[in-house]
Amino acid sequence: MRSTEAAAIDIRAFLESPGIATKAAFRRGEVIFWPGDAAVSVMFIDTGGVKLSVRSKTGREAVLAMLGPGDFFGEGCLVGHMVRMQIATAVMPSAILVIGTAKMQRLLRAKSELADWFITYVLGKNIRIEEDLTAQLFNHEEKRLARTLLRLARYGTRDKPQRIVPCPSSATLAKMVGASRTKVEFLMKRFQRLEFIDEDKGLTIHDSLLSVVLRD
C-alpha cells in the first residue's frame, strides 16, 4: 500500500499547500547559496534550473550537477550538515520553493508516502550524479557533452524529456563536460550539423543525440 501512495503523491502540489514552503525568485546567474552559508532549508525547483558546483582555492570550478523543475537540492541539512558544501547557482530565471529543515523533518516523519517518495528520489539523484562523474573520468569529450545535453533535457529521469531547453553558455558547458571552451563550441557545431541539436530557438535536443551516448 505504501508504494502505491508514494507513486501517487503529487510533490509539487503538496509543497505548494498553505504553510509548507515559501517561494523565492532568482535571476539567471544569481547565486542561491555559497559554501559556508548556514544550511537551514531544503529547496525544490518549481521552475527554472540550478547548477551545483564546487570551487578550489585557486578558483577552478567543477560542476557536479545540473538540476531542473522537480528536483530538490540542499538536502544535506536533513542529515546534520550545518553549512552548505556547494555553490548553487540559477542558470536561468528560477522559482524555488524553500522548506525549513525542522519542518521538512517533521513532514518526513509524519507522512510515510512523502518519506517513501523522497528516499527514492534522493537515491536516484545520487546515482545520476555518480554516473555523470564516472562519465567525466572514462568517456571522451564528445560523449560527455552529449550526455550533459541529454541531462539538461531531462533524459534518464522520471520526467518527460524536454526537447527545447535554455542553453547554458559555452563556458558553463565546458565546466560541466571537463573540456575546453573551444572544444565544446566545435562539438556543438558538429552536433548541429549532424542534426542532433538545433540552436535556432533556444536549444532543441533531438532523440538522435542518444546515438552518441550509446555508441561504443
Image (cartoon, rainbow, N blue to C red):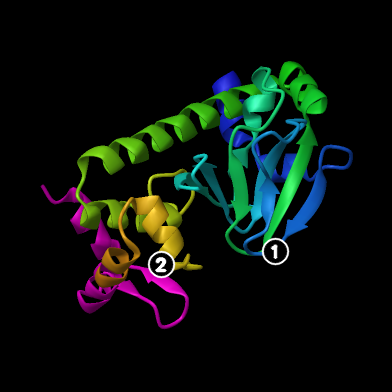
**Residue 89 in magenta stretch:** no
Dot 1 surroundings within 10 Å: few (below 14), some, or many (20 or more)? some
The residue labelled by disc 2 is: 170
Q: What residue is rendered at 77% in x and 18% in y? A: 110
Question: Does residue 90 sit above or below 108 in this rendering?
Answer: below
**Residue 163 visible in the displayed image:** no
Front residue of 145 and 215 = 145
**Residue 105 visible in the displayed image:** yes
Residue 121: x and y in percent read 53, 32
> In the image, is 206 to the left or to the right of 140?
right
The residue labelled by disc 1 is: 27
Q: Could you say which quadrant of the image residue 138 lies in?
A: top left
Read off the magenta span. 187-216
Q: What residue is rendered at 64% in x and 64% in y? A: 28
Mark found first going from the N terminus, 2 or 1: 1
Residue 61: x and y in percent read 47, 47
Q: What residue is rendered at 26% in x and 69% in y? A: 196
